[in-house]
Structures are given as C-alpha cells and as structure tokens.
Image: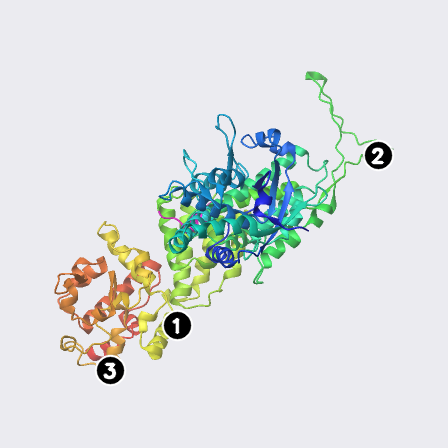
Amino acid sequence: MELQSLHNVFSNKLLRIPDYQRGYAWGEQQLKEFWEDLIDLEENRSHYTGVLSLKKVERDVWKHWHDERWLMESWQYVPFFVVDGQQRLTTAVILLQVLVEFVRQLPNEEDREYLGLRPLTSIVEDYLFIEKPPKKIIKTYKFGYEIDNPGFKFLRYRIFNESNEGVIEETFYTLNLENAKKFFTENVKALFEAQGKSALESVFTKLTQRFMFNEYKIGDDFDVFVAFETMNNRGKKLSNLELLKNRLIYLSTLYSDDELSDDERKKLRDNINDAWKEVYYHLGRNKRRPLDDDDFLRAHWIMYLKYTRQKGKDYINFLLNEQFSPKNVRQKVEIKTDSMKQVEEMVGDEVEIDYEEDEEDEETASANSWEAKLTPSDINDYVLSLKESARHWYNSYNPENNPDLTKEDQLWLDRLNRIGMGYFRPLVMSAFSTSDVTSNERVKLFKAIERFIFVIFRVSQSRSNYGSSTYYNAARHLYKGKHTVSDITNWLHDDVSWKFSEGKFKYETFQDSISQKYNKNGTGFYGWSGLRYFLFEYESELARSFAKHHKVTWKDFTKGEKDKVSIEHIYPQKHKRQCWRYGFGEFTTKQRKYLCGSLGNLLLLSSKINASLQNDCFADKKRTKRDKNGKVLRNGYADGSFSELEVSHYEQWTAQEIKERGLKLLRFMETRWDMPLGDEGDKLKLLHLDFMRENED
C-alpha cells in the first residue's frame, strides 16, 4: 500500500472524528516524541507516522452537516470518519495552527505572508479551514470532531481562535488540546529564536511532505466498530471505557429489524453517545485532578452488576466477555406467555362474563416468542445508569461548594475524602443514585461509614480490605432495592461492635501500635496514620465553637514541603535548650521520649515552619518570630490556628500540660466517635503516660 503524506491525506477530504471515539488523549510524552521525530528527521528522508484508518461518510449522514455540506455538493470533497489515527492528526493540525499564528506575528511584513514558499492563506485552506465564497459567512474546518462533540467547539474557539465562542465546556480532553498548543507554541518560539524562520519552514515541509501515513480506507463490508475496538494509538491504548462504548454501539447493529427498528436503533446509539459524553465530562470536569476511567467503570460494575474478589481486569473481562458479548445478542431465549381468554367488552346491562371452562377440544393458543438473551432494553438501562452515576461519582470527589449537594452532604463527603473513603465509594455513589434515599438518610450512612473507617482502620489498624466484600455488595443491594440505608447503617454499627466490651472501646490494639512506633523510631503518636485527620477534626470542632471559618485548610495541612512541618512537637524532639529542662528534668530519657511523642504534645499549625524552629522555647513559640529585617519566620501560637490559640493560653509547657491536653484530646475522641476509652488510668495508658500517675502516687 502506497504511503501518503499529510498533504495527500488532506487533499479534497473532510476528516471527522466519529462520535464513538474519545477526545484528545496525548500528553507530554507523546508530544515530545512527535516533536523530536520532526526535528531529528533529515531533510531528504521520510518518517513513517503510522496507520490512518478512514471510513467514508454516507450521504444520509453528511447531508445534515450544515457547515460542511456545500463542500461535498459544490467542490466534490469526500468526507471521512477517522477510525484510527486521530491523535496524530490532531497533533499535526495543532502544530500547523501554531506555525501559522507564529509567522503572522513576525515583525517583517514579507515574512508574515509565506511559510516554505507557500502563502499562509493557501496553508490555512489546505489544512485548517475554508470559508464559503462569496460572503464567507460559513467557515468549514478540514479536520475536527462531529458537530455535536464539545471537543470540536473547544478546538474551533480555543485552538483555531474563532471568535464569539460563548460558554465552552472544558474537560480533561480539552485540557490536553490546550496543553498541546502551549507545548508547540513554546517550542516553535524557541526554535525560531535559535535558528530563524528557515527552521520553521523545514518543520512545515517535513510535517506536510515527509511524515508518511499508511492510509487505509475501510470498505462498506467491514465492520467499523470491530475495527475500532482492536486499534490503538501510539503510546495511548484505548481505555476500557472506550472499548466498552464501541462494544455497545456494535451490539446495537446485531439486532434484527424485528427486535429493533431503525428509529429505536438510532435512539439507542444516541443514548450510548450521550451517556459517554456525560461520563467523559464528569471524569474530566476537574481539569487539575481528572478521575480515572477504570476506577469509575469498576465501581459502577460493582453497584450495577456484581463484585468478585478477583483483582486486575476482572470487571472489564466480565463486561466485554460475559455481559455485553455478541453471543448474548445472537443467543435467543424463549419468552413464554400464557394464553389469555379473549373477553369482548359489552355496554351496560349486556355485559356477560362466562366463567365456564373452555371446551375440551379447544386447544390453548400459543403466544410464545423469542428474543435476544441481552435485550436492547438491557443495554439502554445500563448506559442510562452509567450516565447518571458519573455525576454522583464526580460529586463524591468534589463536594466543596457543590450546588448538587446539601450542606450536610458536602460536610460529610469532605470528611470521607479526608479520612480516605476507600472501598466505600461505590456505596456512596449508590446512595446518590437510588432515588428514594433522602439527604438525611445519606448523612446517617456517611456518619456510620466515617466512624467505621476511623475506629476500624485509623485506630484499630485493621487490614485495609476488612469488610470490603460486605460493603461492595451493599452498594448493589441498595441500588437494586434489596436493602435499605437503615440495614446498611446497622451493619456498619454491628461490624464496629467487636471492638467494644461492656460499652468500652478495647484500646489495647491502638496502644500496641503506638508502642511499636515508639520502639521503632521514637515517633509515638506522630507516626499514627490517623493523626492528621484527628487533629484537623479537633481544629474543626474548635472553629465551630467559635463560630468561625477554618484558619487552616486540609490541603495546606497535608501537602508536604521539604524541611517543613505542619504538625509540631511543642516540647521538641531536640530539647537541649536550657528553657526545656524546667518541667522535664525529673524524667528519664525514655519517659521524655514518651512525653515528646504523646498526643497532647502534637499541635496543628496554621502555616508550615522550618523544622529547626520547632526547637524554640515555649515563650518564643507563642509570639511571632522575625529575622533582623522584620521578615516573619514563624507565626506565634497566638496568631495561628484555633488549636495554637488554645495552647497559647498556657503559661508554661511542662509534662503536666502534655498530660492535661492529651486527656482533653482523648475526651474529644470519645465524644466525636462514640468510643468510650475508660477512666483516666486507661487514658494515661493509651497516651503512654501512665508513669506520671505512678509519680503522682
């Protein structure tokens, strides 16, 4: 097969990315490879760019393309769907746009008109867009997405700089388009500054004449959906979500006309496309933190179909090979319908109902029929559920100031995200997807989940998969109406109850895990995995008591910086200064280690400080510290978080204050998570300060 240059590929063609394809998925690595291939290519050589699979668009489709139809009718252009190769073509078009933009702003007027002996107007018309003469009101793009794809709108207005864009929907895929343009803009500028315009002309020539495609046109007798399902792009395999979408569209073509009329087939395909458009929108809605395709698809599979203990690709294997396999469409099952006695409706007094049995010689009429094991309704119900669930999946990750959620929903989802929702996320999605679950019921469920996670995982240090099967299955039971929120809430309370004896929390496991941290590296409570969540919740409780907003955010509290700390040892680990000898000199080295790492000695800071500042004396910590130029080195406790403010009220900081504050924090733990910890002696054991009770005695 003869290889085609980009110029030949675009000649007298309109290229459109079909509705069953994903958006632009290339990232930095693929862009670097593409650019390096261009720069490193010798002038007299060609570069094999890959396969380009095209499928001719039939007239009954393109006749509805209002901005494109004139090219086919008047200029005999041929429209094609890009089945494979869209990532490379999109990248090439973006680079061409960047080259045109860059040349147009060159200071020399003559330089602004040509690139590689080609007028810019000719380059634009060959590769980017053509304006319909004579009025030039209609602008037809040579390459793009199908008209109803939001990515096409972004491509036109943000990449090709078309004006009057209005509101543009942005997703993870549109961010990739934007990043690609920024990448080429930076590199084209750098290349020009280093080598001049001739280097840009070389790039243009190599891109349009030396980058060669193996162009393959798919015939009418070849199933385009099967082809797409098996194709990959360079460095970017099709995701499971993309494979599933194409599979469902393919299945819609297998039903007979008796099972699915043309209108119904089109409606089913429209529903599939709409669902995936919605799914992609929500997964990429937070551009800085896009959600993983596989995580969502697996969670929905758990909620909608089943859960297994298998790992890896069990869910996609089930979806493609069992649930939505072609054999389930081709396999027909008998639908039995009992014969119904035909009753003629009469008017008024003429009504007579014959209760006599049919005569023995009358045969029962058969109304049996055959239908596919997997019906069109099964597919339709699935995609509608997927579409609705994507919104709830996004909301579960992004509750802050979310208008879809009540304030209580926002509060508790935020807590679940901070503590680590883990395997409960499908259940949370199910609670939103189930229409008869109220906000109050959801909040009760979220409270029970949060307590379960704190008690079982953060305090008791149970294995991370403890209870996972139960609550994966609970997501489906709730969604299918087999169990209620109250049922699941009761399960959560019951599954925590084994950690209690006679109403008191069995804290020994927690105590042992803290002891191990003291023995291993001396950190004690500082090494506790639940410390940040616990201290932040305590800070939140203080903020509520003052009816104030937080002085510290979770993001600032958890985001690490080298050589800086957000949780401070008030009595420092390196306690060599004279000021720290008072109040601690009577204790042994081991006891001082316990005091330093005890819960009451750990403080959430409103702003990170250099680790060396932890060694300051208590009086210095309470006030703002500045260098000789007046620059703030650390905020004082009196100007810090609510927790810092509370500590600043102490006159001094000794072992007694560590003990008192530790007991206060444990009393908060008891109340907040309903986990009685016993008397003061029990609490001192947990704090590893029981030696202070002995000293007092």
- Neighbor class of circle 2 (other Cα within 10 Å; few <14, some 14-19, many 20+) is few
Q: Which residues are magenta?
A: 391-400
Tell me what residue is drawn at x 13 percent, y 61 percent: 630
Placement of 665 over or under 406, stated as above or below: below
Main SS of residues in magenta: helix
Residue 562's quadrant in the figure? Answer: bottom left
Q: Is residue 120 magenta?
A: no
The answer to whether residue 87 shows anywhere in this view is no
For residue 589, the mark is 3
Q: Specify the color scheme.
A: rainbow
Specify whether 322 is left or right of 522.
right
Kind of element beneath mark 2: loop
The amino acid sitting under disc 2 is Glu
The answer to which of 569 and 291 lies nearer the viewer is 291
Kind of element beneath mark 1: helix
Residue position for label 1: 509
Label 1 vs 3, first from the N-terminus: 1
- Neighbor class of circle 3 (other Cα within 10 Å; few <14, some 14-19, many 20+) is few
The answer to which of 89 and 671 lies nearer the viewer is 89
Kind of element beneath mark 3: helix
- Neighbor class of circle 1 (other Cα within 10 Å; few <14, some 14-19, many 20+) is some
Which x, y percent locates residue 388?
A: 51, 43
The amino acid sitting under disc 1 is Thr
Residue position for label 2: 363
Which x, y percent locates residue 167?
A: 41, 36
Q: How many marks?
A: 3
Tell me what residue is drawn at x 42 percent, y 64 percent: 456
